Amino acid sequence: MLRSHRGECRVSQVAQPVLVEAPVVASERLRLFKQLVPWVLMVGVIALMARFIDVHAALTALSRLTPMAITLTTVLYLLDRFSMSFKWNILLRSRGYWLSHWDAFRLYLASGFVGYAIPATVGGDIFRAARLAIAGQSGSGVSATIVLERVLGLLAILALSCAGLLCTVLEGRTDLMPLFAGVFAALLLGSVLTAISMSDRLYRFLGQVTSRMRGNRVTKVLHSLHNEYVALSKGVRPLVWFFVLSIGNQLIRTLMCVPVLTSLGVHVNLLALCALLPLSKALAQFAPIPAGIGVAEGAQVAALTLAHVSAPQALVVALVLRAVELATLLPSGLAYVIDACYVRKNA
């Protein structure tokens, strides 16, 4: 009996490390999988574009670009950055966080630099929140302005695209009817969720309905941001201005393509561009890839081809926009270094 007991102890002692190490190995594999997925997605999208787009025709079209077109695109890109920082600063000031428009613009440039190291816009958003938190601002308050910026910005994209698609469908593009229905449904759902997060009455109703779903991710986000949303929503005027400026910002982003398309000899349909290009921006925001490389270009090519731009010419537009963004990395990097030095000095 004693030998049997000792034998069982030995078996259990040998088996125990295996049971302990198994979750660790699974966790490491999951972490490795999460790291590989963005790069596989990026390479896959680039490979698909190379497979289905005439690259030689794109290079030929690229040679037709004029310096004036590139210059105008760069100016519009910087105007886009400034308009984004300007409207974000409206939310900050409505919460009592005084920041000059130049400082907000510099932070936006620096966040764009960070976005090339961390997937999509998440890295830039974290940098802006952390940077202002170190400067003495409330981290939760600043984070709420950034989240609200994303929410209202997405609603502005959907509203502009929905209006543009409706007009385009009424002009005879019935092939875009399913897309219009999908965008309209997304706009309706987003508006309802945003209204719930800002309304005390609807929020209490949501709390009763979702009392059994406390672990749901969407419910957690709505609960955690409710107080900040309510505080921000008390100033209706800043939110209205922000929403209007967000639509203007999307129009600027659409106009960024016009100089390139014009230099390529493409007949520009502004209505179709305003209806389709904002959707490509919304899609790139959710890409788990640094700066949305590959996915942003693929989304822009898809949007432009729906606007009756040939695939090679659409690829040229996407590549020029990426090149302009990369060209601004030098000033963006300098802005990041300035802020990083400030962070070290005050750490």
Image: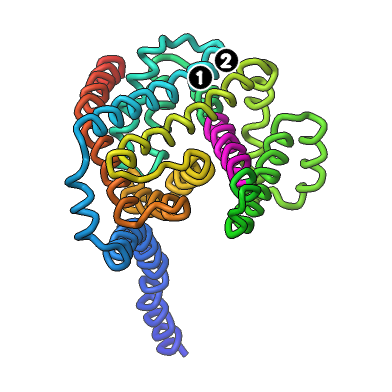
Mark 1 neighbour class, 10 Å CA radius: few under 14, some 14 to 19, many 20 or more: some
Label 2: few (<14), some (14–19) or many (≥20) C-alpha neighbours in 10 Å: some
Image location (x, y in percent) of residue 110 = 30, 27
Compared with 44, 93 (above or below) is above
Q: Is residue 244 magenta?
A: no
- The picture quadrant where one finds residue 254 is top left
As drawn, is 227 to the left or to the right of 323? right
Q: Which residue is mark 2?
A: 95
Mark 2 and mark 1: Cα distance apart in space: 10 Å
Q: Secondary structure at mark 1?
A: loop
307 or 86, which lies in front? 307
Dot label at residue 249? none
Q: Which residues are magenta?
A: 147-165
As shown in the figure, which amino acid type bears the numbered disc 2? Arg
Specify which label sits upstream in the sequence, 2 or 1: 2
At 34% from the left edge and 57% from the top edge, which residue is drawn?
311
- Where residue 138 is drawn, which disc sits there? 1
* Residue 182 position by quadrant: bottom right
Residue 3 percent location from the top left of the image: 40, 89
Q: Is residue 159 magenta?
A: yes
Residue visible at 32% across and 66% down in the picture: 52
What's the residue type where badge 1 is placed? Ser
**Front residue of this view, candidates 327 and 133:** 327
Callout 2: SS: loop
Q: Nearer the viewer, mark 2 or mark 1?
A: 2
Q: Tell me the quarter of the picture where residue 55 sits.
A: bottom left
Q: Position of residue 143 (x, y in %)?
A: 51, 28
Please identify the quadrant where the C terminus is shown. Answer: top left
Q: Main secondary structure of the magenta part?
A: helix
User: Residue 244: image x %, image y %?
Assistant: 58, 24
